[in-house]
Image (spheres, coloured by chain):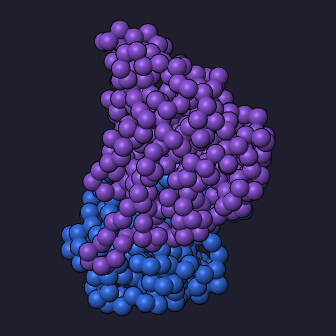
Amino acid sequence: MSLPLVFKVAAIRQDSPNLKTYIFKHNIRAKTGQFVMVWMPGIDEVPMSIGWQTKEEFHVGIADAGDCTKAIHEKIKVGDKLGFRGPYGTSFDYKDYDHLICVGGGYGTPPMLNLSQRATEAGKQVTLIQGARSEDYLLYEDLFKQLGVEILFSTDDGSKGHHGFCTEVLKEYLEKVDRSKKICIYTCGPEVMMVKVAKIAKEFGVDCQVSLERYMKCGFGICGQCCMDDSGIRICKEGPIISGEYALEHPEFGKYTRGKSGKVNN
Amino acid sequence: MNLNTQLCNIGFPNPTVVASGYLGVTGSSLANCANKGAGGATAKTLFMDERQGHANPTILTFPGGVINAVGLSGEGIISAKHEFEKYRKLAPENPMIGSIGGRNLDELVEVARIMDEYPVDMLELNFSCPNVDGEMGKPIACDPFLTAQATKAIRKVVKKPISVKLSPNVPDIGLVAKHAEANGADAITAINTMGPGMVIDIHMRRPILTNKVGGVSGHAIKPIALRCVWEIYRATKLPIIGTGGVIKGQDAIEMMMAGATLLGIGSAILYYDMACFDKITDKIRDFMKEEGFDNVSELVGLAHEEGFDRDKLPKEY
């Protein structure tokens, strides 16, 4: 059954100039990389990935990026309710790897936090390469450090870490990393960045998993709103996590998406 | 066991077709269904202009089925041409049914005229969406005379076969079907969603669908769909695309026995995902073997009493 569960916001944290992390006291039991549909009554319902997650609570990092998220930012206070359907979709596969290299661009970082939690618990080595426009927009440094994750930053303006793109940092990192360990690259962020990451992974012969986002309605694989050309896979069902290599087979990957009406946005 | 099915001289490799609204936004999505076992596909209803539909939540499930108020979103008939071309390329063996809608008769006729030129095998006239009352008033299929008028006007401009999709929310669906038949319909698709219905969240203290109400489908409407198909089978001579609660092979066989030639498959995808098409056709095949049938067409209308002959129905009404 796919009806929402309703939780009260336990805490709200402003983590960057336009991203707030909403904390809920509930064991949502999401696998890393899965998403939930967040319902703001009277406004809309949008897919969101899970950030920090324990048996007691889960965090959702919501960037002000559209009408619904704007309404959540403006109207939802501690104690207010939001609805959740899910968790839905595929998850990151990390069990067969020794060293995880996570590449988070902008608001793509929250699922990397959840992945880092589970992977470090399982004794894996985790490296995070996080890119953002400037230092203020970098997310969750303390939490990643607490998990013992190695962190490399890049910013567009050079205010912290490498001055430039996180894909440049990734390339440099792969050139010197110990390849005797089984490595996988995980990425979530702007799609153009993920295309670059998937291509770099292919070039270096390293496995890669990408987290995709498309406009969604049902979330459980029946409406067809989030299907990708040309395979027709549903991002809510066969995704949002697919292998980088498979993603690269899709002509729309990094090129276009479809909006609410189904029309292609170039 | 022969599962090949003919409807309006269009050959389907098996009697399952994806029902309109399910996985029907893109050509590649429907081709994926065909490649996973669907005999054919019906695209999502298109209007002349781009439509955004209602705000989410638009599709929910409840114990017994699905409720939706997508609100006929679509990119518009002109812009959607590439989706039909893509489907044709990716699933050349599986017929495509193009579904059309319109806010008024002029728009319906214009959209039908354009769809007729697209690489589709037949047209389905969506006269029965229950989710846009506020915008368009009661669906055409709720009135036998409006159904007659609209079918007639579209028939005049369309060369390909047309199937009229009917609403269960009427006192006499057989009567509506007769009016479609008398005005040039080649087939009937029955049924569209029931209702509308509603689901309420007790913690938010309000309906969950942003549109508040939505069409009900799935297990909950199967008995209604069976009865409607039964009545249409007895009221007309038209082949029927039986849609509504066909989840498993057993449901499919019941639907064919009520009178359906093809089976519209929708919420089955929710329960059995892409395997639903093969699950249904495997069961039909097993049943035919057990019961000694060679052709799937032999099942159509079997639940009607011996001696009942559609060909003896009066021609005019």
Q: Residue at x 30, y 79 (%)?
A: B205
Mark count = 0
Quadrant where the image shows the C terminus of chain B? top right
Q: Is residue A229 above or below residue A218?
A: above
Q: Is residue A90 above or below residue B246?
A: below
Display colour for chain B: purple
Residue B177 vs residue B55, the one in the foreground: B177
Q: Is residue B200 above or below residue A95?
A: below
Res A122 seen here: yes
Percent coordinates x, y for residue A76 in the rendering: 39, 88
Percent coordinates x, y for residue A260 in the rendering: 59, 64
Q: Residue at x 35, y 29 (%)?
A: B254
Q: Is residue A12 above or below residue A265?
A: below
Residue A135, picture quadrant:
bottom right
Relative placement, left or right, of A227 versus B259 is right
Display colour for chain A: blue
Percent coordinates x, y for residue A97 in the rendering: 37, 51
Q: Residue at x 31, y 70 (%)?
A: B200
Residue B274 vs residue A252, the one in the foreground: B274
Q: Residue at x 50, y 58 (%)?
A: B130
Relative placement, left or right, of A1 versus B34 is left
Relative placement, left or right, of B110 versus B168 is right
Res A206 seen here: no
Quadrant where the image shows the N terminus of chain B? top left
Residue B302, picture quadrant:
top left
Residue B23 vs residue A95, the one in the foreground: B23
Percent coordinates x, y for residue B79 in the rendering: 75, 55
